[in-house]
Structures are given as C-alpha cells and as structure tokens.
Image (cartoon, coloured by chain):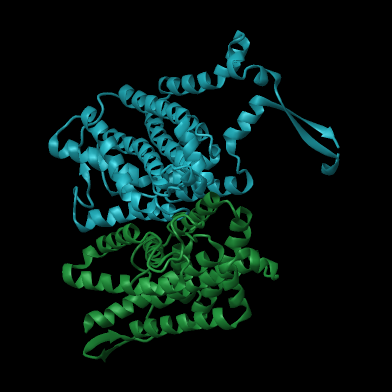
Chain colours: A green, B cyan
Amino acid sequence: MEIIIYGAINSIVFALIAVGFSLVYGVSRIPNFAHGSIYVLVGFLTWSFLNDLKMPYWAAILSSLVIAAALGLAIYRFVLMRLRGLPTSEIIASFAVSLIILEGLRMQGIAGFKGFIGPFYVLPPLIEGKILVMGVFVDYQRLIIMGGGISMLLFLWAFTHYSKMGLSLRAIAQDEQAAMMLGINSDRVAMVALAIGSALAGLAAVLILPLGNIAAEQGYRVLIYALAVCIIGGLGSWAGTILASFVLGFAMIISTSLFGALWESVVLVGTIILILLVKPSGLLGKQKELEERV
Amino acid sequence: MPAETRRKKRLDRSIKVRSEGLYGLASWREMTYLACPRVILIAGLLVLPLVLDMYWQRVLCAAGIYALLALSFDFLAHFVGLVCLGGAMFIGFGGYISGSLNEYMGWAPIVTIPIATVAGAFLSTLVLVPCLRLRGIYFAIVSFMLPLFAVYVIIALSLFGSTEGLSALATFPNSWVEQYLILVVVLVALFSVRRLVSEDIGLILRSIKDNDQAVKASGISITIYRIKAVFIASLIGCFAGAYLCHLYGWVGLSLFAMDFSILPIAATVLGGMGSLVGAVLGAFILTPLSEALRGFGQLRVVLYCLVLLCFILYKPEGLMNVLERKYHQFEKWEKV
C-alpha cells in the first residue's frame, strides 16, 4: 500500500518536473537546459520574498512565478531567437544560460551577496500536518503536490485543446511551416511556450521544495530527472512524458524499498540505457530512427 | 561616410592563390607563407615551458588538458554533428581507470596512461552507443547526464574511495616531462585530427552530419562510423583524464565536475567552431584567464558561460576564423 501511494506521489513529482521541459521541446525543438536552474531560482526567489521582503506566502509564490515566466520569455527573445535553426548553438547557448543561473546562485562575495550555500533555505509547507490515507501516513504537502500536479495536467490538457494559444502551440509542434502559412507567428508561440515552461518549472519548485531544503545542486538533479522522463517517454510526446513519469516514479520507489535509497540513481541510468537499447525513440516516441530531426 | 554607401571588399591575397597545391613548392616565399602559421603554433607551444615560472607551468599543463578536451568537442560537434556536453565523463573515466590501476596494481604511469586511454575510450564509447542510433539532441542529453550519474553511482556503490577519492598516486619524475608530454600530445592530436577529417573517413563523417539519409543510401553504416568517431574523440579525452590523475597524483569526484564540460565548449566557441586549431588556441587563452580569477570561486564558471554566450551571439565565427581571413585576404572599404 505504501509503495502504491508513495509511488503515485513520486510519479506526479516527476510529471510536474518534466512537463515544462517536454512542452518547450515539443513546440520549439529547443532542449531547454535552463529548466533545472529556473526551478532552483524560483525556490530561492520565493524564499527571499518570504524572509527578506516579508511578503505573504501566496504573493511570494505568485511574484516568483511571474519572474520565472518573464525570464523564460527573455531567454527566448534575447538568446535563442537569434540562434534558431543552428542546433549546435541552441544546445550550447541554453546550457550556458543554465550554468550562469545555477553557478551565479552559488557565487559569493560580490556586492555583499553571500551566495545561496548551506542548509538554511527551507520553504514552509502550505499546510502542516499528516493524515492517514488507507493505512499510510501522508503529510498534507504531498497531498497538495498530488492535487496540484493532477489539476495542472488537466489544465494543460484543456489549455492545449480548447484555447486559441494552446491550439497554436500544438499546431507549431505538429508542422511548423503549415502553421506559419495559417498565420501563426512561430517565434511568438515558441516564446510563449518557453514562458509557460519556465512557469511550470517554478510551480513544480514551490510545490515540491517544501519537502526538503533548497540547494543550487538540485538544479542538475531536477534537469536530469526531466531529461530522463522525456527520453524514456519519447522526446516531444506528451502522453509519453506522463507514462514515463509513472514508470520512473514507481521504479524508483520500488527499488528504494527493496535495495535502499542509494540505488535510485543506478536504477535511473539502467532504465534509460535499457529503453534506448530496446526502443531508441522512447516508449511513445513517434520519431523513427532517422526520419526527422529528433 | 554612412554605412549604406560603402561596403567591405575582400580579396584573396595573390600569394595564397600562388601557393595552392603543388605550386606551393615553387619558391621559398610560398613555402614560408604556408609553413609560417604552423611553425608559429608549434614553436610557440614548445617554447612556453622555458619562459614560464613554476606556477604558470602548472597552468600550462591544465591548459593542455582543456585543449585536448576542446579538440575532442570540436571534432565531434563540427565534423560528426554530435554535441557532447559531458567532456567531464572522458576525464573521469580516464582518470579513475589510470588512478585505480596505479593504486591497486601499483603500475607506473608509463603503463597506466596508455591502458587508461584505450580502456576509458572503450568504456565511454560503450555507454554512448545506445544514443548513437538517433539523430539530434539525444546524444547531447545523454552525454550531459552521464558524468552526473557517474558521481551518483560512485557514491552509491562506494567505489574507488567513494567521496574521498584516491590520493598519493604516482606523479611524473619532473616538471619537464609533464609539460612536454602534454604539449607534444596536444600537437600530435591536433595535427592527426586535422589529417583525419580531410581523409575519406572525414568526408563520410561530415556527410553524416549534413545528410545522413544520403549516406545510408550509399550503403554506409552510419552507426559504425559514428562509433568510430566517438571512439577517437574519447581517446583524446581519456588521455587527458589519465594525464590529469598523474599530474596531481589524485583522483576524486571533481573529475566529473562541470568545469571539464563547459570550459572546452567555451574555448571552442571563442577560438572558432570547426577550425580545430581555434579550439586549442581558445583553451590556451581561457585557462590562464580563469586561473587569474581563481579567487572568485564560482564566478569562474559564470565567466566562461558569459564569454561563451557573447561569442555565440555576437561573434559566432570565433577568433581563429577571423585570423585566418586576415592572413589569407586583404580587405578594404569601397564605395557602393
């Protein structure tokens, strides 16, 4: 029972982390390596708004999400837009942006900035306490993650199927040239996608981070999780992303309870390599080996 | 004069045209013109250890390591079309193999470095093979993840001294051996990769980058050639790792650190992508720069990234291509 409940929660965590990355990649074919660093940045921003500016919790969360979206917009507008169509440069540039943010957060001694190092940065949970669910104690924050994750996935599904912006996101993802012929501005759509993707990373951060403390190193781990989920599910496939987060979430919880917490990263690598060997394009990836620019 | 009424005119120097092909041997002047850049590079690198003091000699060795990594990155990215974001993996594999052979078997560096180079290259190629069947960013993503995973795996299974690493390994007999070893290897690697990409295999690799379906249609296995290319690149990288472990007499988890992945990329972009020499040159410029900023800690990584971004956005051709153009062509403004 414990495995099922915690596995489900863990899967939702993976889905929350990966869905933003998957959205950006699906629309603009840009691997947003800054995903993990925006996640951490939002954590630290919320913390500083709470503790330095003494904002109420909801205002801190909201304003840091807005900043994340603006950052995503700026990254696309000022960096990636100039490099569209140069895959090597796109990858390198987004990687560089990611490292600037992550290592910048750890920087010390410039203008009295102490750097976010050490275990002091903890976000409070939205609601304290625990509850008994089917014989297992689960704290409220995990239930909030569960609810938040599921409602976000439903919202995204509705957004991409029933709103004009969402439909144009899907149009660009399917066939960029045809979409452009119908009057959809591909740059603007990709910009919006990156903004939404960054806000989703931020949302994941404020939901998940209260479970532990915030550290800049988590950026790499989060990015790895997002990449792992997307590779296993098939890059650019949204259903695959959700399926893969459940596969990975349960695989990690099961391996942790069988062998111990240290093995989770080994399981992660093993799963990726296995999937790449057996079905290189991922579980639900539509790309054939060489047909398209995957 | 406003910008619209004039433009820059570029013409090849006549000596460039005269020294092409066999005609280069026609006179001393043409031969000097051809040999000059190569001789300056070789002589410059070989003289450096003689003029530097102890501290900067160490920096020179580090620069050589980064130069090798940059060379392997540039080769993979611009001649094979595989963007490798995990240069640290090569360093880590090479270093750990060489270090553990030295620690557990007691072999001397002269034995462990060649073994670690080859074995590390086999291992790196083996873990990268699964993503070689796909085009595009799969390789970038998997190569980015592998060094970070390697750290988790080493900690999880507490291999090779876990978080503490292995220390007190054998070092080189004196500082001349360590400097000239790396400089000679850099030069040999540089010129052999340059030769390689102009041979038949280089032609195939470049056409895989440009149009893999056409290569497939010619009955050539893409995967085999990509595996060969990755093996060559990881040979270069793993040598750098094995050398590094005996240079400092120590291996640890920081062999998988981001520095080894990002500095070579920054060096390549700074020096000029696709020129190979540019990558080496960029490493010899950036490493001393970062050494001068050692006091600032993490700021160094931020600095490389800023250099990288500025060059990739505003000067994508890089230093080497500009120099090459100045050498071969003359420019003047002319009225439109």
Question: How many circles with numbers are drawn on the protein?
Answer: 0
B76 and B63: which is toward the camera: B76
Classify residue B317 as left or right of residue B254: right
Image quarter hosting the N terminus of chain A: bottom left
Q: Which of the pair B118/B60 is nearer the observer? A: B118
Identified at 38% across, 55% down, the residue is: B142
- How far from the left and from the top, in percent, is residue A105? 45, 60
Tell me the residue at 60%/44% (across/down): B316
Residue B149 x/y as whole percent = 31, 56
Examine the rendered structure and indicate whether residue A165 appears above or below residue A26: below
On screen, residue B212 versus residue A130, left or right, reads: right
Work out whether residue A48 can be spotted.
Answer: no
Q: Quadrant of residue A227?
A: bottom left
Q: Residue at x 35, y 70 (%)?
A: A213
Q: Quadrant of residue A138?
A: bottom left
Q: Is residue A260 above or below residue A106?
A: below
Seen as rendered, the residue at the extreme top is B27
Residue A73 visible to the viewer: yes
Q: Residue A180, how many percent across, how many down?
A: 67, 66
